[in-house]
Image: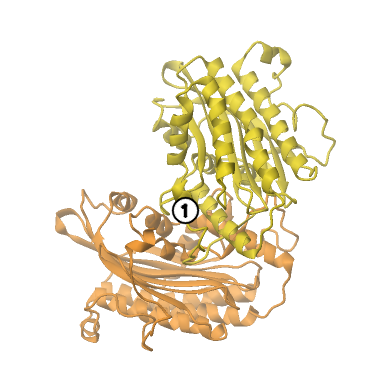
Chain colours: A yellow, B orange
Amino acid sequence: KNLFMFKHIHCSDDNVPENIYMGTAITPGVTNAAVQQKDMRSQMEDMILRAQREICDALSKSDNNAKFIVDQWERPSGGGGVSCVLQDSHVFEKAGVNVSVVHGTLSPAAVKQMSARKDLGPGPHHFFAAGISSVVHPRNPMVPTVHFNYRYFEVVGKNGKTSWWFGGGTDLTPYYPNKEDFKHFHSTLKSTCDKHDPKFYPEYKKWCDEYFYIKHRGEARGIGGIFFDDLDDRDPQLVFEFAKDLAATVVPCYMPIVERHKNDGYGLRERTWQLLRRGRYVEFNLVYDRGTKFGLFTPNARIESIFISMPLTARWEYMHEPEEGVCWWWWWW
Amino acid sequence: KNLFMFKHIHCSDDNVPENIYMGTAITPGVTNAAVQQKDMRSQMEDMILRAQREICDALSKSDNNAKFIVDQWERPSGGGGVSCVLQDSHVFEKAGVNVSVVHGTLSPAAVKQMSARKDLGPGPHHFFAAGISSVVHPRNPMVPTVHFNYRYFEVVGKNGKTSWWFGGGTDLTPYYPNKEDFKHFHSTLKSTCDKHDPKFYPEYKKWCDEYFYIKHRGEARGIGGIFFDDLDDRDPQLVFEFAKDLAATVVPCYMPIVERHKNDGYGLRERTWQLLRRGRYVEFNLVYDRGTKFGLFTPNARIESIFISMPLTARWEYMHEPEEGVCWWWWWW
């Protein structure tokens, strides 16, 4: 199976050192010195590994100190990653936080997918990509699902010139409406964005709404958040600080909502509705999501890490009619 | 919502006439006379509507005479269909048998998808399509899922010339191996194929194995069956008879397997494994299946009919390791 392509270094059953990361650094050169010298690859790797730790710690704390599965893996063709998963736990039905730092040569399929946006010229293209991505599916239908992803890319294109850019976003998919939660989520994101550029929040909120749209259903996936890609219009260090601040905003954005609702009452009716909406999540991920498709069409991708985003369970009913009070409520958000 | 685009004619709660079809004819001209005169469009429509009835009757009989939901719908831009669904019943968790007879102008996206196989030239292209398609997901994990689809296409392409072809297939996706069942399924299909052309079975079995392959998993979806497309190399009446015979083979192929196992014992372990495999079914349908993608990218397609194929429930576990005896058994089939 595909998995056997990946050298499994250690997992949480082994003796994981209590350190600042969930696993260990992926690139040997990621030392304090390299980070201090503001080498972008090192800074990014260190940032996402620290963010992974911070977010997993917050999720674990909220879930009765549940222990994450930590899988550290190597990619034979360059780089590796750390996948952290909490599965079938009390508060979280499935929470995956994935870091990967990979490099090598882009597959023709990947180049094609990128060429729509970047004029790269004929390959082969050397690339470097470092990112953190996560989907958290709670068990209680009153707690929304959150998704976030922050990534840094370098590609060597025409004339050996290296292009770089950052992308990412954080967005919320609730099952039941709660204006107070939605306001908290969006305003927390807006505060962080505004510190960097007042144009960011309105622009990236719109981008998010457009991106997380399930065309074949004519439905939004959730209530949005922010989404951006190809950000390279200013000093890379400034863009990095923006991505870093956003990664640090995940916990204050999301965890108060979890705390507020994780013990709310619910029954089979709410659970069924949640599973139907998780079906929509699966539809979006498999049909439209760039990251998922990029992964699926990349030879030797680590499929288990890509599918961390999938819910533990999902449901499809023929001609389901949502009950009153639930019915397409996100249309008015 | 998309659904409102479709005029709902009647459903099983109304007074459906006890006739040879589950619903009523879709095209007004489908009379005995037209069928007798061997008009291909009429013959095909009559054949698939009768097959739908026969198959639904067999499924219902096996499921304690459970009553199908029957939705007759019209497509505003031409044609319509009859969708029959048994949902959350005793023997069948979700069984959908869909007939559609549609015509109009192909969307640019649909032309693009077809042009990979047919040299149609620049559009607009008038088309006619009549087909029956079905997925049956039983509740008991010892009963396999079956899928079949038989369709007839006409497209007006270059110089006003009409191309026609038939396509289709029947394939089985078991959750547990049973050599006797597999032998019955394949040999029944082979007998029908051999009556028409001894080359059909070996060729179409191979095609089926290639088609129902989940690339990103490196797994076959099931144990195959037959699959063919673009069949137009002989008199259309002969190809029609082949498709008709295959539609009539669904019941003898599948129902004995249902009867043999529908009361087999199982527990949570088997149910969980079944749901994980249903996750794979969802992955195949959303990522690779031509029919599903054709539907999803067709503006104003009836999404509820397309997603009849989705299981009622599916599951994704991180790093699931199948237990011994279950583990990737289809590799040796």
As shown in the figure, which amino acid type bears the numbered disc 1? Answer: Tyr
Q: Is residue B8 left or right of residue A49?
A: left
- In the picture, which quadrant includes the N terminus of chain B? bottom left
Where in the figure is residue B247, as x and y percent of width and height? 41, 76
Query: Which residue reaches farthest bottom?
Result: B18
Residue at left offset 55%, top offset 64%: B311
Question: What residue is rendered at 43% in x and 35% in y?
Answer: A206
Q: How many marks?
A: 1
Q: On the picture, is A193 further left or further right than B231?
A: right
Residue A157 x %, y %: 44, 22
The part of the image, by quadrant, that contains residue B231 is: bottom left
Residue A10 vertical position relative to residue B224 in the rendered view, above or below: above
Q: Nearer the viewer, residue B120 or B11?
A: B11
SS for callout 1 = loop
Which corner quadrant holds the C terminus of chain B? bottom right
Q: Is residue A119 above or below residue A2?
A: above
Query: Residue A145: x and y, percent?
Result: 60, 46
Residue A76 visible in the current orientation: no
The residue that disc 1 covers is: B288
The crowding category of the residue bearing disc 1, from other C-alpha atoms within 10 Å (few below 14, some 14 to 19, many at least 20), is some
Residue B252 drawn at (x, y percent): 50, 82
Mark yes or no: residue B8 visible: yes
